[in-house]
Image (spheres, rainbow, N blue to C red):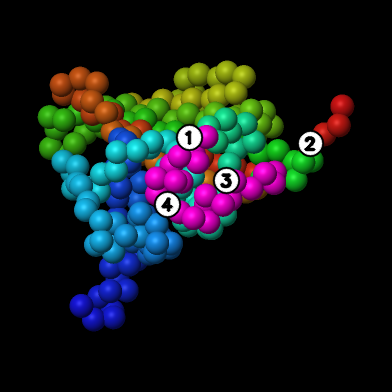
Amino acid sequence: MDNGDWGNRLTHPVTLNVGGHLYTTSISTLQRYPDSMLGAMFRGDFPTTRDAQGNYFIDRDGTLFRYILNFLRTSELTLPVDFTEMDLLRKEADFYQIEPLIQCLSDPKPLYPLDTFEQVVELSSTRKLSKYSNPVAVIITQLTITTKVHSLLEGISNNFTKWNKHMMDTRDCQVSFTFGPCDHHQEVSLRVHLMDYITKQGFTIRNTRVHHMSERANENTVEHHWTFCRLAYKVED
């Protein structure tokens, strides 16, 4: 293999199935720490297992792997302020043998300045698909924004009135839109505009994930999730 082919292999997307959660990254990211288990695994020194779709399978906590992968991408540990699974995350870091992460988790320093906290926005797209159509047909799509940042929800209500007829549900911390088979393309347009609006409010994408599940014999449900975060300063009462 020449240098060009090797470079392409390192940057080529690879999908991992970690405990049922799918993550897409590059081999270069997974090999950031060569002495780690992942470094050995994708160097060919460690046996690998594939799932039925051909994805690399790792039988570990799929939810916590988002923090493992983000550390590999940035070499920084960033956790939600209300994170309560530190012991479990330490076990995952120990399993993957990522020494810098193990050291970081042993460091008692606060993750953020004491006068700040992290605000989170969750954006999810749930799409039901017919298995019997060729090509696969969209049955219904639901788009949901969940956050405790009420000003953001108010901004969405005020700036996205074009899609008001699709608004299905509004709660204290959530807004949902639903789209039928004939207008599911509008969900894509709304999602693109929402992601742009959220990022312009100072949020950055922390994590993306995809989940596939079957509810009925003739339907598939595919869920896409995006987590956005930003730091905000605490306000004294």
In the structure shown, which secondary structural element does the residue marked by tag 2 occupy?
loop
Disc 3 residue type (three-letter) = Leu
What residue is at 62 percent from the left and 31 percent from the top?
A: 82
State if disc 2 and disc 1 touch (CB < 8 Å).
no
- Give the answer, above or below, for where 111 lies relative to 149: below
In the structure shown, which secondary structural element does the residue marked by tag 1 occupy?
helix
Mark 1 = which residue? Answer: 88
Residue 151 belongs to the span the image colors magenta: no
State if disc 1 and disc 3 touch (CB < 8 Å).
no
Q: Which label was assigned to residue 234?
A: 2
Earlier-in-chain disc, 1 versus 4: 1
Look at the image and give the residue range highlighted in magenta. Answer: 87-110
Mark 4 = which residue? Answer: 97
- Give the alpha-carbon distance from disc 4 to disc 2, as whole Å: 36 Å
What residue is at 28 percent from the left and 68 percent from the top?
A: 9
- Give the alpha-carbon distance from disc 1 to disc 2, as whole Å: 28 Å
